[in-house]
Image: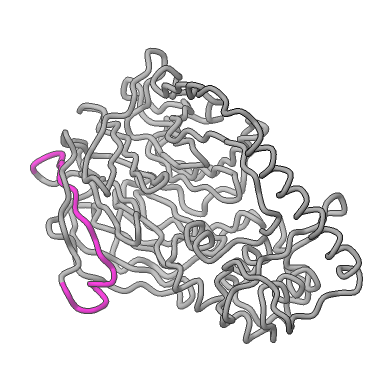
Amino acid sequence: MPENPGPGPTELRAEPEANPLSEREIEILKLVASGAANKEIAAQLVISPNTVKVHVRNIFAKIGVQSRTEAAVYAIKHGIVSVSNEAPTALPIEPIDGDPGGALSTPTAGDSVEPQQRQWLMPAMLVAALVVFAIAAWRLLSPTPAPVAAPTFDPVAIERWVRHADLPTAVSAPAVAAYENQIFVIGGEAADGPTAALWRYDPTAATWAAQSPKPTAVTDSQAVVVGGRIYVPGGRDSTGAVVRALEIYNPRTDTWEIGADLPAPRSGYALVALEGKVLLFGGWDGSDFRSEVFEYLPDDDRWQVRTQLPTPRAYAAAAVVAGHVFVIGGADQTGPLSDTTIYIPEADAAGDTPWDTATALPMPGAYLNAATVADTILVVGGAPDGAAVAYSYNPADDAWTPLDASTDVEPRQRAGVIVLGPLLHVLGGVETETPSAQHVSYQAMFISFMPVLESGER
C-alpha cells in the first residue's frame, strides 16, 4: 500500500421566474411527460416509487392539473419539454382512481371524447373486431404446425469485453459519472499528479471532448448524479492533502459551483446516490482509515452524520439495489478486505441497527468500484500490488460470479467504472505503475427482442 497522504448547454425552462417547481420536480415532470410510469421514474432516478408518487402529487398541486396528460401539456406549453415536428409526442397513460402512478385505465361513460375522435372510434372498433375474428378463425381452421426448435444463444461465445476510443489523457482513479447518455471522467491521477481535467465521452459518436476543469485537482474521489448535477466530494489534492471541498458540476451549462464542505476530509471513500441524497462511506482522512457515514442533502446544501460502518475502511466499492447500499471490500490497516456489508437507510432513520452482512467477495480487494445493471452488482478494480478483481454479485441469490475473461482485453486496476445501458465502461487505471488511457466495456446484459401482438391500448 502507498505511504501517506494515502494508503496507497442551457436549462430547458421557460419563464423561470414564474415556474413554481424545484429542479427535482422539473426532472420528474419531464419523465412524466415522456410517458414513464412511477416505477420507471424511480429506477432512473434511484429513488422509491412512493417518493415519486409524492413528488408527482406535489407537482400536480403546484401547477394546477389533475392528470398526467394535463401535466404533459403544461410541460410542453411552458417549454419544459419540446415537441419534435417530425413525430407526435405520446402523452402519458392516465392512472386509475386518480392515483398519479401511470397505471393503465380505460375511458368511462363520463369521459369526454373529442368530435374528431368520435368520427373514427366506431369504425376502428369494428375493424378491430373483424381482425380478431379472422385471426381466431384462421387458428381454428389451420393445421397445427410442427414444433420448431428455439434458436440457441450462448452469451459466453460472444466477446463481452470491447475496446473503445482511449481517454485523451492517461489517468488512474478518476471520478466517473453518466448523464443523458454521456460519460464524464473527472480528475484522477495523471503522470504528473492529480489533475483537474474533465472529459465528456459521446458513445454514439465515439468521441471525447474537453469540458470546464474541476476547480480543485484531486484523485481518489468519486462522483454521483442527483437532480441533473454531478457531485464530487473530497479527494487528495496536488499537495498530498486530503480535502473537504464539495464541487458540483452542471453538465448542461458546463459550469461548476461549490457546495458545503464535508464534515471532515475524505479520500478513497465509497459513494452512492439514493433517494435524492448523496451517501459517503468510510474513506481515508490523510492519516487513518475511517468508518463514518456522511449524508448530503442537496436541497439544503448540508451534510449530516449517519450510523457508522461496522469497521473502518477505505477504497471500498458501493452500489444500490432495491434501496439498500452494498459496501464491498476495501482496505484497512491489515490490508485488502473481502467482506460485504449492507446499509439499510430505513432502519437508520428509525433508529435501528442499519447494517447487515452478505456473502463476502471470493477474494480480498481494495481500490474497487461498482455499478448496478438490472439488480446485479458488477465490481471491478484492485490495487496495483495485488490481484485484479472482476466479479458480479446477485443479491437475490447472495452469490458471486467471476466476470467472463477476455483473451484480448484486461481491465486496469484503479480504474473508474460506470454503467451505460447494458455496458459496464471501465476507464483509465494503472498499467505497470503508470496511468493508463484505456477505455473498455463489458457486456453486462444481453437484450433480445421478440415480436408481440398488441391490442392497440397503451
> Hey, which quadrant is residue 261 in on the image?
bottom left
Where residue 389 appears, x then y in whole percent? 26, 31
Q: Is residue 354 left or right of residue 82?
A: left
Where residue 409 appears, x then y in whole percent? 41, 18
Residue 5, can we see it?
Answer: no
Residue that lies at the very extreme toward the left in this rendered image? 334
**Residue at (60%, 76%) from the top-left corner?**
22
* 32 w.r.t. 188: above or below: below
Q: Nearer the viewer, residue 138 or 234?
A: 138
Residue that lies at the very extreme toward the front in this rendered image? 141
**Residue at (57%, 40%) from the top-left corner?**
199
> Hey, which quadrant is residue 100 in on the image?
bottom right
* 39 w.r.t. 139: above or below: below
Does the magenta run of residues contain 346?
A: yes
Judging from the image, the colouring scheme is: one colour
**Residue at (25%, 71%) from the top-left corner?**
306
* 88 w.r.t. 363: above or below: below
Where residue 252 appears, x then y in whole percent? 65, 56
* Picture mark count: 0
Q: Is residue 253 left or right of residue 119?
A: left
Where residue 406 appears, x then y in whole percent? 37, 18
Q: Nearer the viewer, residue 393 or 78?
A: 393
Part of the protein shown in magenta: 334-352
> Hey, which quadrant is residue 9 in on the image?
bottom right
Residue that lies at the very extreme toward the top in this rendered image? 407
Q: Nearer the viewer, residue 435 or 140?
A: 140
Quadrant in which the N terminus is drawn = top left
Quadrant in which the C terminus is drawn = bottom right
Residue 54, can we see it?
Answer: yes
Does the magenta run of residues contain 349?
A: yes
